[in-house]
Image (cartoon, rainbow, N blue to C red):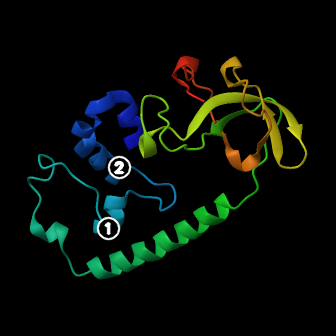
Amino acid sequence: MLRACAIQYGTSWDKSLPYAEFSYNNSYRASIKMSPFRALYGRRCELPCIGINRGRSELFGPGIIEDAERQVRMIRENLRIAQTRREEDLEFAVGDYVYLKVSPIRGLRRFKVKGKLAPRYIGPFKIIDRKGEVAYQPELHDRLSGVHDVFHVSRLKKCLRVPEEQLREDELNV
């Protein structure tokens, strides 16, 4: 999320930091099946104007400890399921679209952003061939002609939907 703010707003990304934090804390997480705010406080985050007529009895009650323990058990189970889902072997078919992981190089500025806020993946690229059990050959841009064109499956990330606006080649500094 910070990476997207840094790319979109450039040098003034820090002004949008409170909004990014609020958005992150209130966004649904598939691994725990709820937002981090709800996991911590046991309720949805409400803006000040929404909860004005609410009494204290609705926020605190005798069953709050049981609810919290039930949520902790549910979060642990959801995290365990999410971790086993990540351990599954990745496999791509010819014609699938994938993103290619960009290795960070100290001191090199990619996408006009330096360091941890730079994008981690570029693409999408179409898989044109499978080389062995765990290696794939994506169709790379001409600008990436100096890069080896066969990648291990760990360097690829599945593209669920091919976006209309792909990364411009002139932004890429290899």
Question: Mark 2 falls on what kind of element?
Answer: helix
What residue is pinned by disc 1?
Answer: 40
Kind of residue at badge 1: Leu
In the image, residue 125 lies at what x, y percent? 69, 28
Q: Which mark is residue 24?
A: 2
Snapshot quadrant of residue 173: top right
Kind of residue at badge 2: Tyr
Residue drawn at the location 45% of the way across and 54% of the way down? 29
The mark that comes first in sequence, 1 or 2, is 2
Residue drawn at the location 23% of the way across and 45% of the way down? 18
Residue drawn at the location 22% of the way across and 81% of the way down? 62
In-front residue for pair 113/133: 113
- The span from disc 1 to disc 2 (Cα, nearest Å) is 13 Å
Left-right relation of 75 to 64: right
In-front residue for pair 25/75: 25
Q: Quadrant of the N terminus?
A: top left
In the image, residue 111 lies at what x, y percent? 47, 29
In the image, residue 84 lies at what x, y percent? 66, 65
